Image: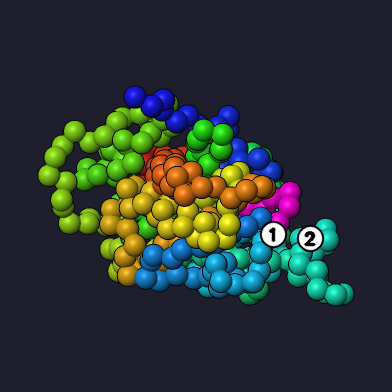
Amino acid sequence: MAAAYRPGPRNLITDVAGLRVGNAQDAGLKSGVTVLTAEAPFVASVHVMGGAPGTRETDLLAPDKTVAAVDALVLSGGSAYGLDACSGVMDGLRATGRGLRLGAALIPLVPGAILFDLLNGGAKDWAENPYRALGLAALAAAGPEFALGTNGAGTGALAANEKGGLGSASLLVGGATVGALVAVNPVGSVTTPGGRHFWAAPFEIAHEFGGLGPDPASGLCAPLDSAKSRALFGPRANTTIAIVATDRALTKAQCHRLAVAAHDGIARAIVPAHTPGDGDLVFALSTGQGDPASDADLAEIGHAAALCLSRAIARAVFEATPAPGDLLPCYRRR
């Protein structure tokens, strides 16, 4: 029997060498931003499987587009308003001299994706869009350590029957490191009927989200029971947005295939996933140099990315903490 994978030292996406993640949030707003950047531009692609995505600059990441690398990726609350977080990140990167140089022009490349948290009880009556400033603050906070749960883009996130949040996980796979980062705000449930066991439980390592194990019940083919949908006027205020990463060298086309494979991690951890009311999206990136991975290596990296993403989704919900005005309880306070 092959040896089991094990997490990296932090069990965070920043176990992938060179990556940094920063959070910024506003408690009154009940929303926030998470930024991933690196020491140098990185190859990236994206795959969308939800029916209601909100994105910026993702066309750049298609394998047939000429841009070779980007400077940062942004996950944000705020629905379409949150896309302005990318502008704040661009401001911060430009100030440090980061970006694509075209003659005298310097253009930081910052794709992003958003989730819907406009009806979660937070104060959304701003006079000026707050997300540009939150993006800049998240970039300034970027480092190897960052908080999970009710932080960054997960600050105002809600799952079907409990608070969502920000999650991350990693695995060491042969000579490579693989990691995932996710903001969890789905129409679907992260827990089996009854709310005690996580759908992702078969993939848990070292009690990272409570250690209760899989649901012993069978016959879990039940209709979705969503307190969120009832509270927020139907199944439209959703989305799970994620980033997976590896330090193996990958081409842009291979990053796209990695993003496709990683969506399995969403489907294993959230039931149902990829609905018409979700904007489910996965960015995939590589910081590696040298010869690209073989097809066999890419298959293993994709498998590991899906495992990391399932675990990260459960960790996001497990680490959520209560705040005034919450519409749904936290998993650990139910």
Q: Position of residue 254 (x, y in %)?
A: 52, 56
Q: Position of residue 314 (x, y in %)?
A: 40, 42
Q: Position of residue 276 (x, y in %)?
A: 32, 70
Check the image and report above or below for 174 versus 156: above
Secondary structure beneath dot 2 equals: loop
Please state the extent of the stretch shown in magenta in the rendering: 36-41
Mark 2 vs 1: CB contact within 8 A: yes
In the rendered image, which residue does mark 2 sit on? 98
Residue placed most toward the observer, 162 or 326: 162
Residue placed most toward the observer, 280 or 244: 244
Secondary structure beneath dot 1 equals: strand
Residue placed most toward the observer, 32 or 49: 49
Q: Position of residue 138 (x, y in %)?
A: 67, 54
Q: Earlier in the sequence, mark 2 or mark 1?
A: 1
* Residue 67 visible here: yes
Answer with left or right where residue 31 lies relative to residue 103: left
The quarter of the rendered structure image containing the N terminus is: top left
Callout 2, which amino acid? Arg
In the rendered image, which residue does mark 1 sit on? 71
Check the image and report above or below for 149 versus 56: above
User: Residue at horizontal 58%, vertical 57%?
Assistant: 251
Callout 1, which amino acid? Asp
